[in-house]
């Protein structure tokens, strides 16, 4: 790892961001911590282009933290549906309630206090504190981690906690030390922008980087070596069988998923581990029904961060005897369109509707 002078780095990043960075995004035009927090949560593992529409819709429905805190979870999940990583939406709602209940509707102004709120980790807390309150605090999202490890030729394995801690220390040393009101928001945004547009994972455009003359990885001609992280995500595959039950008046049967695990707390069609169990359940609810029609749809693959879901859907139409209960209910089209549904389930129901079955 190489020593780099902090003030020199900060000055270059601030000047570059002002001239070449991203300055058009809606959450960059405010120091309202609610809006900055909302954007930071949405941008976790999600592209800016995808977030823009969701961000606008959320603000139109929930213009402030009190409005979000006062909403029902189903409405929040419904607006989030399609954005993925749904634990973010659940924590978003919990955090809004905590801000209202514990802080009188005002976000704390330090990263240390922000980290006590649901769903706000160290990097997100640092971003809110830097952008909104000009606190001298570091962030280490994926883009910034890549910029700094290359700048420093930091070859410590970030799967090891002591190396992660050391990188946080170096990130803090590089922060601006003067004119923090202006410098901290622009420096923080500048590191994000460099990682997103210049210091990319593959084929970084070092000729456009304001830090090229002080970047150790560039001098060593191997920027793509960094960051170093040996621990790999273990992936596995599962087959899920989905039962799409269509009842009277174009209603669909939905159940709420368990509070933990994949699609936790969201509405979903019944899920079974295999076709045999699906058929047994179907036989139990269709025994007395007349004119029941069913067919199987082509399988599809839904890729999650840690899991490959092979989805097999069976559609059943008829006056089925399944009744309202604690585990599920019949939803009209107007109702299911507005609740939190996992993306593949919403697509499944939308496709069924387009075939004039719903």
Image: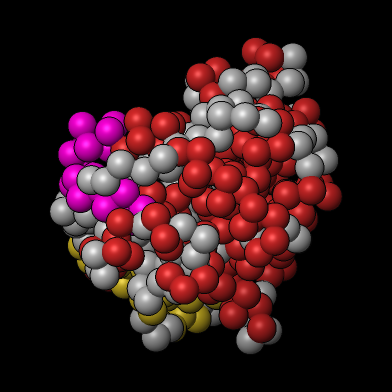
Q: Is residue 337 visible?
A: no
Residue 163 in view in this figure: yes
The residue lying at 35 percent from left, 30 percent from top is: 169
Front-most of 245 and 105?
105
Q: Nearer the viewer, residue 118 or 277?
A: 118
- Give residue 135's position: percent from left, percent from top: 61, 26
Q: Tell me residue 187's x, y (percent).
A: 59, 44
Above/below status of 166 relative to 299: above
Q: Write down the region rendered in magenta.
A: 149-166
User: Closest to the observer: 47 or 31?
Assistant: 31
Left or right? Give the position of 267 relative to 141: right
For the C terminus, give its image quadrant.
bottom right
Of residues 96 and 158, the one drawn nearer to the viewer in this rendering: 158
Image point 42% across, 32% down: which residue? 173
Task: List x then y, in percent, for residue 259.
Answer: 43, 38
Q: Judge from the rendering whether residue 319 lies leftward or rightward of residue 283; answer left or right.
A: right
Residue 38 vertical placement versus 181 (above, below): below
In which quadrant is the N terminus drawn?
A: top left
Identified at 16% across, 53% down, the residue is: 230
Q: Is residue 179 above or below residue 290?
A: above
């Amino acid at each position: 790892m190489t020593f780099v002078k902090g003030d020199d780095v900060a000055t270059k990043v601030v000047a570059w961001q002002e001239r070449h960075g991203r300055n058009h995004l809606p959450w960059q035009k405010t120091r309202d911590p609610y809006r900055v927090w909302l954007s930071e949560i949405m941008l976790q593992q999600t592209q800016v282009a995808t977030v823009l529409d969701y961000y606008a819709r959320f603000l139109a429905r929930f213009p402030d933290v009190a409005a979000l805190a006062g909403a029902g979870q189903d409405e929040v999940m419904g607006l989030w549906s399609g954005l993925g990583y749904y634990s973010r939406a659940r924590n978003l709602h919990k955090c809004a309630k905590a801000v209202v209940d514990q802080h009188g509707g005002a976000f704390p102004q330090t990263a240390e206090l922000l980290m006590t709120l649901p769903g706000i980790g160290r990097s997100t807390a640092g971003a809110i504190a830097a952008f909104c309150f000009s606190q001298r605090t570091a962030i280490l999202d994926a883009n910034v981690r890549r910029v700094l490890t290359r700048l420093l030729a930091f070859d410590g394995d970030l799967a090891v906690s002591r190396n992660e801690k050391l990188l946080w220390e170096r990130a803090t040393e590089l922060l601006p030390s003067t004119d923090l009101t202006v410098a901290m928001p622009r420096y923080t945004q500048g590191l994000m922008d460099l990682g997103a547009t210049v210091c990319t994972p593959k084929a970084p455009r070092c000729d456009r980087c304001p830090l090229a003359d002080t970047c150790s990885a560039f001098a060593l001609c191997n920027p793509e070596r960094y960051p170093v992280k040996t621990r790999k995500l273990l992936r596995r595959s599962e087959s899920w069988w989905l039962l799409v039950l269509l009842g009277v008046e174009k209603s669909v049967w939905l159940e709420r998923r368990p509070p933990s695990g994949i699609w936790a707390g969201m509405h979903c069609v019944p899920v079974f581990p295999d076709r045999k169990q699906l058929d047994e359940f179907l036989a139990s609810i269709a025994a007395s029904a007349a004119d029941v029609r069913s067919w199987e749809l082509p399988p599809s693959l839904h890729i999650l961060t840690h899991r490959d879901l092979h989805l097999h859907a069976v559609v059943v139409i008829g006056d089925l005897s399944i009744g309202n209960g604690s585990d599920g209910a019949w939803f009209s089209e107007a109702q299911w369109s507005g609740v939190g549904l996992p993306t593949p389930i919403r697509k499944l129901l939308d496709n069924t509707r387009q075939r004039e079955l719903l």
